[in-house]
Image (cartoon, rainbow, N blue to C red):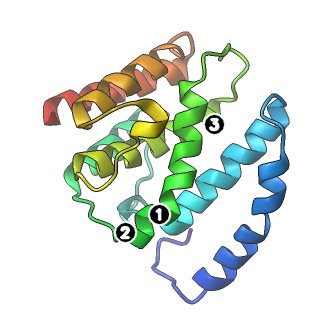
Amino acid sequence: MTGRLCFERFDALNASLLAFEPLIGKLPDDDHMAVLTKATWHMVMIELLHWSHTHTNGVVEASLDAAFAATTHLSMSQEISPSVEAIASLAPHINYFLTLLRQERDVFDEAPWVTIFAFKASLIGWQLVAADCWKPSEIILVSDKWDMRRWMNIVFERRKHWCIGRLVINSLKELDDVI
């Protein structure tokens, strides 16, 4: 991203990325490279469909911890109320990460950027739940922002053995101040 709003390329980017969807859907869920490919594609779709202030507010930090804190702060301080169409476009991509996080599998071989992508997708999902405009109940059985926050803590707690997991858990503690 250049940091400037540029919508003239949206249609071309969206069409190109959507062309990959049939291929992405055929990738197996038990192959590590396939998970990396799927996670990257879903995050790119989220970034394209959900224009965030992190794209233009200059979120360039000196450390990953500071970047997580800035991202968490932005998710708490900015109200979100997307259209029904926007939520419908974002939902499958956020649901991918929620489903990935929900799985009771060994997370020791998960790539760090998958955790980062999942954290960002979870924050967007939390924003939508907090705004009462989306319910991921069929994916993770939460009914409100408090349930979503507790669920996020549980799934990221499984990643606490890594530095990246501890950074996510510390950033999630900031949500407690809002809730």
Is residue 138 visible to the viewer in this orientation of the structure? yes
Q: Quadrant of residue 31?
A: top right
Instruction: Give whichever of 142, 56 is nearer the camera.
Output: 142
Residue farthest bottom in this picture: 8
Position of residue 71 in the picture relative to residue 40 (left or right)? left
Which of the two labelled residues, at mark 1 and mark 3, occupies the earlier sequence position? 1
Residue at x 51% of width, y 65% of height: 89
**C-alpha span from label 2 to label 1:** 6 Å
Distance Cα–Cα, label 2 vs label 3: 29 Å
User: What label does residue 84 carry, if any?
Assistant: 2
Verify CB contact (< 8 Å) between mark 2 and mark 1: yes
Task: Please report whichever mark, 2 or 3, sits nearer to the chain's N-terminal start.
Answer: 2
Q: Which mark is residue 113?
A: 3
Q: Quadrant of residue 142?
A: top left
- SS at mark 1 in the image: helix
Q: Quadrant of the C terminus?
A: top left
Disc 3 packing (10 Å; few <14; some 14–19; many ≥20): few
Furthest-front residue in this view:
138
User: Residue 114, relative to residue 168: is it above or below?
Assistant: below
Residue 36 placement (x, y as % from top left): 75, 40
